[in-house]
Amino acid sequence: MKTTRREIMLFAGGSAVGVLFTPAPWRLLTDTALWSENWPGIPAPARGEIRARYTNCSLCTAGCAVRARCVGDQPVALSGAGGHPLSHGALCAFGLAGHHLPYIPSRVKQGPVKEAAAAVADGIAKCGPAEYVVTLDLRPARTASWTYRRAMAAVKNGRYVTPAVDSSVAVDLSKARTVLSFGVPVLDGWGTPGNAIAARPGFRLIQAEPIESRTASMADQWLRIRPGSEDTLAQGLAGQIAHAAAAEGTGLAEREIAALAAQLEQNGPVLVLGSSRLESTGRTIVSRRETPVPAEWQKAAPVTDLASLPDGSVRVLIIDESAPGEYLPWKAIEKKLVADNPVVVALAWSREGYGRHAQHVLPVGVYPEVAGDIPPAIDSVAATFRLSVPLVPVPEACVKPEEFVAAAAGLPVTDTLRERADAIHKAARGTLFTYADTKSVELKDVKADDFWKALNAGGCWIDAPDDKAPAARLTTAVAELRPVEESDLPLVVVLSHELTPGSPILSKLYQESNLRLGPNCVALHPSCGLEDGAKAVFETLLGKCPVAVTLDAGIPPGLVQVSASPAVLDLCASGARAKVGRA
Amino acid sequence: MASPPRPVRAAPERKTPVDNPLDNMDRHFIARGAVRCSTPKFLLWMAPWAALLVFGLYSAALCLIKGLNQTNMDNRFAFGLWIFLDLTVIALGAGAFFTGFLLYILKLDELRSVINSAVVIGLVCYSGAVCVLAVDVGQPLRAWFTFWYPNVHSMLTEVTFCISCYLTVLAIEYVPIVLRNRKLRQVPSFLVFEFELHKLIYVLAGVGTFLSFFHQGSLGGLYGVLRGRPFAFREGLAVWPSTFFLFIISAAAVGPSFILLTTWLVQKITRKRLVRPEVLQLLGRISGSLLAVYVLAKSIDTLIWINRTSPETGFQAWQYYSWKPFGTWILVAEIGVCGLLPALMLLAPKLRRRTGWLVSGAFLACAGVALNRFVLTVQTLALPTLSFDRFLSYTPSWQETGTFLAVVAYGVLVYSFSFRYFQLFPQERELKLEARQVEEERELVGRY
Amino acid sequence: MISANKQIRAARYGMTIDVDRCNGCGACMVACSVENNVPPAHEGATDRKGLTWIRVYKVDNGEEYPNRRTAFVPVMCQHCGNETPCVHVCPQQAVDVDPSTGVVGEMPQRCLGCRYCMAACPYHARYFNWWDPAWPAGMEKTLNPGVTPRMRGVVEKCNLCHGRWHAAKEQAAAAGKPDTEPVSYVPACVEACPTGAIHFGDLNDASSATAKEAAEPDSFRLLEKLNTQPKIYYRSKKDWVRGIAAAPRPGGAGKENSRG
Amino acid sequence: MTLRGKIPFLAGLAVALGAGWVGFPHAIYRSRPQPVDFSHKVHADKAGAKCEDCHSFREDGTFAGIPTIDKCAGCHAAPMGTTVAEKNFIDQYVTPNREPQWSAYARQPENVSFSHAAHVKRANMTCESCHGDTGTSGTLRPYQVDRISGYSRDIWKVPNTPHGMKMADCIECHRQKGLEHSCLDCHK
């Protein structure tokens, strides 16, 4: 029989009705909904045993004690390890996401190690009488720093350069009854956050800076001074210039300055931060003993200030930025290099630093991949020794900065950290604080091996208090504001102390909220004529870079707040003149 | 749809021009006694709308595939253009249920001449709204959860249930209109089916009315219950906030106006008389009287809200209107210019008899309700609640607008199609015959 | 429900946040995102399309220098205890209040993304996943197995670190402790706050520090007059700070001078 | 309508019903063999092992689930029996110390937070009450996974038990015990 159209339609109708009485359609409905729970692109976190491991954060010299919650061996969350005498279990926003650093998009993954080594060797060989081989160490006073100094001593015309930081001076917040800070972020990342917060009730904080920073908003008194007029205020308070003149220069009222001067008189001891014009009183700034080092290391190159090197004299420059430290503007470094092809090697884990300028960029391990010690923080009166221990394996491609430099200088590669630990143990002073059990023991009661084990399981050696420590002066121990450079650009720069680069999760703090200023972002008063979030160009005499604009009525007109990322620091310092124009 | 201006006498249905076979290939589908323009002309009319629809579907697809990041909505403006659209079209579509209610339950027989058109409009509005809702949710695959795990306390559940049920009702009501198509009548079983269905129509009208009352209300409740948004929050009568009832009245009021408006529009575009003027005036009267009731209720509600509800939650009502551009003018426009004014225009018999007044009255009424829905959706979300909030602005992305336009295009297409092939206006035929007689009489007079 | 199970003492988990101690460092926001597998921002995300279960707002008293004062206010889900606005609007029971803890919970896998709850929340504490979650290559290794990542198109919010609650419960069970044991854990933000501004505890337990602090005269809650009975209490000695709990300043004023 | 007229309709009905009830339930699952032919029975009888000997708790209270290869190596460093299966197992996994890619029949969806401790240690439930007779099975049945949702078939129905491991199954028991409070009791 031939099938008619009518029959086909009937058949179709029949099956349509039939399907409704089977599980098929309903199950498909359920399954598609379930599929939407785990469709492609949604990761399934790895499961495993939850363990706690301890280390020290090496993202800044605070070196806060860290407790890492690990699944298997992989850290999934960091928190401050409690009970620590200095960091008090506190951890800052950047440290909390430190375990993301190995995976940041700007990570340097591989580099021309052999070529770089050859170029350095060649450079050293070519190095003329008036030329130098320089190792630039962004974070001095580490054990690695000692290796660099010894290496530079072993190399002809070797120089060891650091951003001038005097590691032999410490600030004692607990002694101060008044803290006068010239734009130093006392409560926002300066020193050891936990320590500053713990000491806070003990002192009255006076914050002198042009913009109400986080510290200023927490201060007992905020003095809104003109940018770059810190020195003027200091001179006024020190009586070097008349109050009227100081008021003139800072934009404060004359009586404000007089009152402040009186306050400093009565309410001592006074700790002055951010200016070396004004004396701190009492023993708020003392000299700190050096953490012991093996005797044979003493034959090391002295610390040289970059400025003291003649221009066009550096033949070989090796920059170690494996440990973030104070960033020297590239312009300042560049003019020291010899004219005919100098050798510049950057040992970096992020492409956003000197890697932008060096011709050889070598990948290095990053916290928490590598072992290294963290020098004592500025606000640690006692010398300390604590290790940042590896929590995750370092990629094969990475080089060890110390080994690279040592090899270049023909130094034998040894376990310097262990040697240092033994030297400390030999000195047999101070105490060992271990994080897992939050216990302190006298170092002399600990065996050398146990000391080493303890340091690697999360511990900290703290030197014995030194009551005879003489009062000292902060020269430029705290990043001091540089003077206004001459230029007719309309805006005055105020750097905000944001630490970059960090984990992408920090986008919560700037991109997904306006709590902080993001990398390459500028904040301006709403009257500036630009829209919130507009793309713009930030320009100083030294050059320009693209930025995003945030409007903030808290910024006085005529000022521009800039987050201090390397790209920006290459262009300006606080107090510099700048302009922000449409992109 | 627009037909050529040909002398009426030249168009008795028996001798429709067949000079060009291509010209009217679909004439066997066109209702007996109705004259429609030629097929190419019809297609020409449909083409741009179809294009718009395609564009709209494309933007909707983007939102479905790439996600709602394609829109300009955000965490603070969680609802945008689409919700405003839904609330408005559903209010305008209320004509379907209300006319049905008046015709079949209250036996207002004059309305029979617009009921079909009303049903089509209703169907268009509701199906359009449902489609947009499906795009508006982040996980359409889970939409059915609302039926499987319903939260009976949620106004949205009420809305979802009622709208989906009422949409079915509308579909069933639409079927007879389709089946009465000249060609389809030839299938005997269809005729039977249609007849059977028609016996149901009173039940359907009843059910439809009930459902509509509910979801119109719960759409209002949607915002009225938001105690976290003092600007929208209203105190309740029984379990429902006052907006519940305001929405029912306003929808009922504006429904007839919208039918009036569309009918007038179709007449203008097609240059045909489709219904007797009395019918439109009746619609106007109904709309006007209900609008008057609404304006009264709305005013009382607003006063209560300003003097009690809002202050009790710590918000002084006047400060809502201190955020420009949403000044008090919006209140005046909503209740006065687009509420009281049209009510009076439609209630005054003299004015009502003038088409101009009638139509502009109806238009204002519709505009008023649209404004009301806008205020409730957009202004509510724009206003700050926390003291450190900002006043927010929002402009829809082209994808949102595209989806919005798709609904409009879809509406025009479905309506045009129905108008061409189905008997939307039963009076059309008799009106045409009358016109012819008048014509002939005039000729006779002229001869002698 | 709870009544059927007498031996569980109904708790009211809550927080007190000392605004005077908050220096706006953002540690809580980072710790929260790390703990709850909240992805980093999509490049298209802004402060209005982002995911910040806890968000620190920078607020000021609207004055000019020298009277200008600034404070930082962390805002997360306030876990409303009365007529919880988001619970009764959700069409498919994706949001509920746990009677044993008072925690307002939200189930992303039940959510259909209608965002009605976001419109209902006066604290803007609910966030929508406008994009599929994405982590830089390798970073998914650092995800917390205690919390499942959400997908695009759903709403999410603070649940007082339920992952930690589960872990604490499981440890109690493993140690053979009875279920009546009050669960001992702290949310990530509480643990992370370097100034110890946030305290967490059971408000029903009058002996708990949190309950005591909440009862202090200087404690207040946001938009108290809405009568949503939040379980997040704020504290400040400054009158103007306590003032922020009230309704917004009328038009324009303080419009752009709140950042965060 | 005549019966004859109805035939195509009925035919369509029959076909659809057949496909929906018989074909579909098979088509929806993808089947995958387990890497090793493991016999719970043998281990239970010969080694007299109890479940928790291999499926143990960790110190942090979490459940370790399927044991790792070193646990197996503890006994099977060298063949204990004469079966080919064991020999292959040792050659392929123990000797190279490679983890077999087991598929967990009872693996719950990612958003479920199931605490074995709470159920086994606190509520003293037996393994069988959820996992059925897996513990006494002579061989590992192939792992069946839903093609669309990617969830194990056991979620819908555990073989030789009246129940599955769906949310409804959990709720049923929790409701009886009055332990049903909120979604986040069991969801993470």
Image (cartoon, coloured by chain):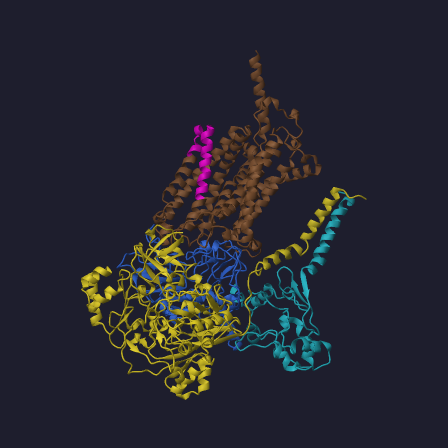
- Against A269, residue B76 (above or below) is above
Q: Quadrant of residue B360?
A: top left
Q: Is residue B363 magenta?
A: yes
Q: Which chain is cyan?
A: D
Q: Quadrant of residue A135?
A: bottom left
Check the rendered structure and report the hue given to chain C: blue
Residue A433: image x %, image y %? 40, 81
**Between A222 and A296, which is closer to the camera in this rendering?**
A296
Q: Which residues are magenta?
A: B344-372
Residue A256: image x %, image y %? 21, 63
Check the rendered structure and report the hue given to chain B: brown
Q: Which chain is yellow?
A: A
Counting every numbered tag in the picture gives 0
**Between A383 and C128, which is closer to the camera in this rendering?**
A383
**Between A104 and A14, which is closer to the camera in this rendering?**
A104
- Against C125, residue A92 (above or below) is below
Q: Is residue D7 magenta?
A: no
- Against A551, residue B257 (above or below) is above
Residue B160 seen in the current view: no
